[in-house]
Image (cartoon, grey):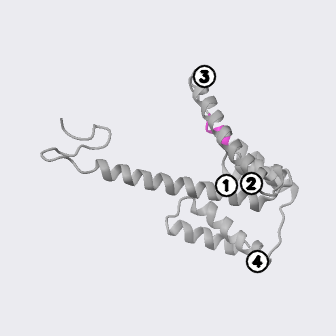
Amino acid sequence: MVAVSTACAVALTWLSFPGGLLFGSMLGSAVLHGTGWVHAVLPWWLGSSAVIVLGAVAGSRFANTSFRVLLDYLAAALGSFAVAVSVAAVFAISVMTFLPFRPADVVIAFAPGSQDQMMLLALALHLDPVYVGAHHLARWLVVTFTIAAFAKSVTRQQSVPRAGKRWKRPGQGTFDD
């Protein structure tokens, strides 16, 4: 499993796939587990250690951040959280209404958060990690490709200067006045 996951991770990184190391290793593991060739479960102490390390890494990003800066962003963070939870709730309720999935799996699958954290949460709560991971991967892919298509359409509309105008570098305005 380590060899196949590493090979997939290196291949996706070489192809410049965003998050290639993470998604490549997950792809390798998914193929091996999905085909039934491998069945592996982490020992509890290793899973717990991974959660602690991920928490420490996430917390270290706030080093040297003043309390005032945190307060300045509090309203925006709460607003963003409210929107994310509302959108997730609408989709989760829709899925639970029409499909026969366990509510706990659906809630974690649609919960706003990073894929690695939600996968660890699913494992810790003894939920279906494949279901949760597939939803988070699908959401990531939809958002990534939608943003790329939107950015390309916006760039296409704004990238050609009008006749007699010169192109300016990003951050300096779009065209000469």
How many residues crowd mark 3 within 10 Å: few (<14), some (14–19), many (20+)?
A: few
Q: Is residue 132 visible?
A: yes
- According to the picture, the residue beneath numbered tag 2 turns out to be 119
Task: Determine whether label 1 and label 2 are within 8 Å by CB.
Answer: yes
- Magenta stretch: dominant secondary structure: helix
Q: Separation of disc 4 and disc 2 at Cα?
A: 20 Å
- According to the picture, the residue beneath numbered tag 4 turns out to be 35
Q: Nearer the viewer, mark 1 or mark 3?
A: 1
Q: Which of marks 1 and 3 is nearer the N terminus?
A: 3
| Residue closest to the eye, 25 or 63 | 25
- According to the picture, the residue beneath numbered tag 1 turns out to be 136
Residue 59 within the segment the image draws in magenta: yes
Disc 4 secondary structure class = loop
Disc 2 secondary structure class = helix
The kind of residue on which mark 3 rests is Leu
Q: Can residue 50 be seen in this view?
A: no
Residues in magenta, as a range: 58-62
Total numbered labels placed on residues in the image: 4
Q: Which of marks 4 and 2 is nearer the N terminus?
A: 4
Q: Residue at x 62, y 67 (%)?
A: 24
Disc 3 secondary structure class = helix
Q: Which of marks 1 and 2 is in front?
A: 1
The spot of residue 62 in percent (x, y) is 62, 34
**Left or right placement of residue 126 versus residue 8 in this view:** right
| Residue closest to the eye, 177 or 120 | 177
- According to the picture, the residue beneath numbered tag 3 turns out to be 71
Q: Separation of disc 4 and disc 3 at Cα?
A: 49 Å
Task: Determine whether label 4 and label 3 are within 8 Å by CB.
Answer: no
How many residues crowd mark 4 within 10 Å: few (<14), some (14–19), many (20+)?
A: few
